[in-house]
Image (cartoon, grey):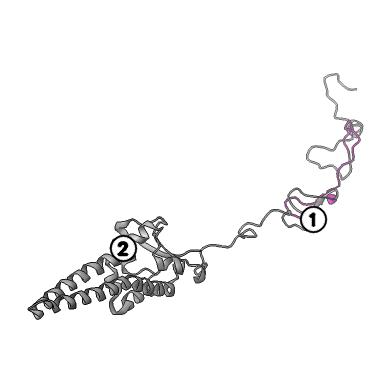
């Protein structure tokens, strides 16, 4: 006889009616719990592993990746330059032909032509002075003293005029004509400052004064300096902070 206070053990039939597995047990594949909607359990073998390009879910590729696992069209892979842009930092990227200061040969020709232009009026003046001196000595009682005095005065005048004419050709003229002498216009050259501006009359005067150093040995000193300068500057250019560039 069973006492009312005794609690009977759980009947096996009650566990079988619930149909749920005991605590700690995993349901079998495809097994459902009672009371849940009748949705089929997903088949784990049909799911692709996430995080790998090229795998798809129900026939569709994952976002951001094409079916082959490469980046979509329009995106560049990191670490590579985009098409149409060159990588920087390599020496020799600019060809020597593209250097606007690589005009050493043209500058030599320009210097020779400008020198001739400056010499022509001086030569004409010298011829005139010699004729005047000769004529004056013929009408003087003391031909030797008169001729000597006139000659000395003519030489001083020629020296002053030489400086004046060369200053006009190499300093004043380019200061009023866009940084170009007459010969520079013909050789398509221009004097600019190192920051690309137009040089002042003072800078052009300094540049011209140092031409007497660059012009030693017929300009050989200036030529050697230009050939060994990164921006082909002679001594006058370096001190005046100017460049000579090619123009169209």
Q: For residue 173, what is the image quadrant?
A: bottom left
- Name the element at disc 2: helix
Task: Please give the name of the residue rendered at 31% of the width and 64% of the height, measured from the top-left corner.
Answer: 207
237, above or below 155, in the image: above
Residue bearing the label numbered 2: 168
User: Which span is picked out in magenta?
Assistant: 32-54
Q: Quadrant of residue 237?
A: bottom left
Cα distance between the residues tagged 1 and 2: 76 Å
The residue lying toward the viewer, choosing from 230 and 209, is 209
In which quadrant is the N terminus drawn?
A: top right
Q: Position of residue 177 (x, y in %)?
A: 40, 58
Question: Was residue 46 drawn as part of the magenta stretch in this picture?
Answer: yes
Nearer to the camera, 10 or 129: 129
Residue at the image point whose x is 28% and y is 68% from the top:
210
Which circle's residue, 1 or 2, is located before the other in the chain?
A: 1
Closer to the camera: disc 1 or disc 2? 2
Residue bearing the label numbered 1: 67
Packing grade of label 2 (10 A; few <14, some 14-19, many >=20) is some
Q: Is residue 162 left or right of residue 180?
A: left
From the viewer's side, name the closer residue of 132 and 230: 132
For residue 36, side relative to residue 135 (left or right) = right
Q: In this orientation, does residue 225 appear?
A: no
Query: Residue 195: image x %, image y %?
Result: 40, 56
Locate residue 224, reporting x and y percent. Answer: 35, 77
* Residue 127 belongs to the span the image colors magenta: no
* Vertical position of residue 213 compared to residue 89: above or below: below
Magenta portion: prevailing SS class: loop
């Amino acid at each position: 006889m069973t006492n009312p206070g005794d609690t009977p053990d759980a009947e096996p039939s009650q566990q079988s009616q619930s149909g749920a597995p005991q605590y700690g047990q995993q349901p079998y594949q495809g097994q459902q719990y009672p009371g849940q909607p009748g949705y089929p359990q997903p088949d784990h073998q049909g799911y692709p592993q996430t995080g790998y390009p090229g795998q798809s879910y129900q026939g569709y590729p994952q976002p951001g990746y094409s079916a082959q696992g490469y980046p979509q069209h329009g995106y560049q892979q990191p670490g590579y330059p985009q098409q149409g842009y060159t990588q920087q930092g390599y020496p020799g990227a600019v060809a020597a032909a593209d250097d606007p200061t690589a005009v050493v040969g043209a500058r030599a020709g320009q210097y020779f032509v400008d020198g001739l232009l400056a010499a022509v009026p001086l030569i004409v003046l010298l011829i005139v002075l010699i004729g005047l001196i000769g004529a004056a000595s013929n009408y003087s009682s003391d031909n030797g003293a008169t001729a000597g005095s006139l000659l000395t005065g003519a030489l001083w005048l020629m020296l002053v005029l030489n400086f004046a004419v060369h200053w006009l050709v190499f300093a004043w003229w380019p200061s009023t004509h866009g940084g170009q002498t007459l010969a520079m216009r013909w050789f398509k050259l221009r004097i600019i400052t190192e920051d690309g501006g137009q040089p002042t009359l003072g800078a052009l005067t300094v540049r011209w004064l140092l031409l007497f150093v660059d012009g030693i040995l017929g300009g050989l000193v200036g030529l050697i300096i230009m050939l060994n300068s990164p921006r082909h500057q002679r001594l006058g250019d370096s001190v005046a902070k100017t460049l000579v560039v090619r123009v169209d």
